[in-house]
Amino acid sequence: MRTPSLTIKMIGVGEAFDPALGTCSFLVKGGPTLLIDCGYGTPFFLFQELSNGNELEAVYLTHFHADHYFGLPILLGELEDLGRTSPLTILGQKGLATKVIDLCEMAYPGMFKALPYPVIFEEFTDSTSFRDLTLRTALSSHSVPNYAISVERNGVKAGFSGDGALTPASKQLLSECSVVLHECFVPRNASTNHAAAADLFQAFQDTPGSIKRLYLVHLQKGLRTKESASFLPAEPLPFEVAIPNQGEVISVE
Ligand SMILES: [Zn+2]
Ligand SMILES: [Zn+2]
């Protein structure tokens, strides 16, 4: 069997206030181990995945909402407990270093400066690389600046929306990925802050792209059980649509 270029573990798939499913966070492996987002609910599930303190190499933050970055002080402290010595790279938009350091200072004063391993911040827009990963971003439509990201390795791309409705730029970026994990808060009638399933289906159907599988995450609490069947497409789309469970692992080839 061919080794996939990337695998993605669903550390959490819930919305902002959904304790049952964990805050949205994804562990990307294959190349360097990269965590996408680290909300307040992320560390407790993530710790079960990490075999040692040095395994995680980088974290990317889509935006500065609690369900996407408030887990960082806990993560940084736990990595210290696990004996981390190697540098940790944190990637994200402009202002990232200040946001993270301020949060750590609020959570545990003095903690950030005392970490026994280096933390490297890389603030970028548009694109950068991390080892053999190429990272590209595009702004979505959300209440604070949120950068959707594509992660490319060996010519294979996975896309992560973070939060927000599609913009022309995020639609373009994500349509070039073979697997997309998209926030989908409501079945239809997207707001300016959140995506709706019907709009995602329409948008990616209209944009001839590479998408093979679209995973809907960050669903409004209760939606998975009450309405999931009714808002999934009745007619087949050019790509598969799935609502993943926490803990599920997917391959990107
Ligand atoms: Zn969120
Ligand atoms: Zn948000």
Image (tube, rainbow, N blue to C red):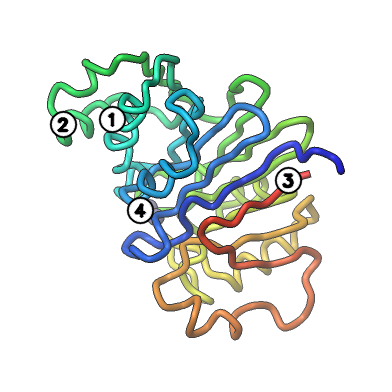
Q: Which residue is mark 2?
A: 108
- Camera-near label (3 vs 1) is 1
Residue at horizontal 41 percent and vertical 49 percent from the top: 45
Residue at horizontal 60 percent and vertical 68 percent from the top: 199
Q: Contact (CB < 8 A) between labels 2 and 3?
A: no
**Residue 180 place in picture, x, y as percent:** 65, 52
Image check: 63 left or right of 176?
A: left
Instruction: Give the mark, 3 or 4, whose residue is nearer the N terminus.
Output: 4
Q: Is mark 4 within 8 Å of ligand 2?
A: yes
Image check: 45 left or right of 197?
A: left
Instruction: Give above or below for 47 relative to 234.
Output: above
The amino acid at mark 3 is: Val
**Residue 244 place in picture, x, y as percent:** 58, 63
Residue at horizontal 54 percent and vertical 42 percent from the top: 27
Query: Which sits in the foreground, 40 or 209?
Result: 40
Q: Which residue is mark 4?
A: 143
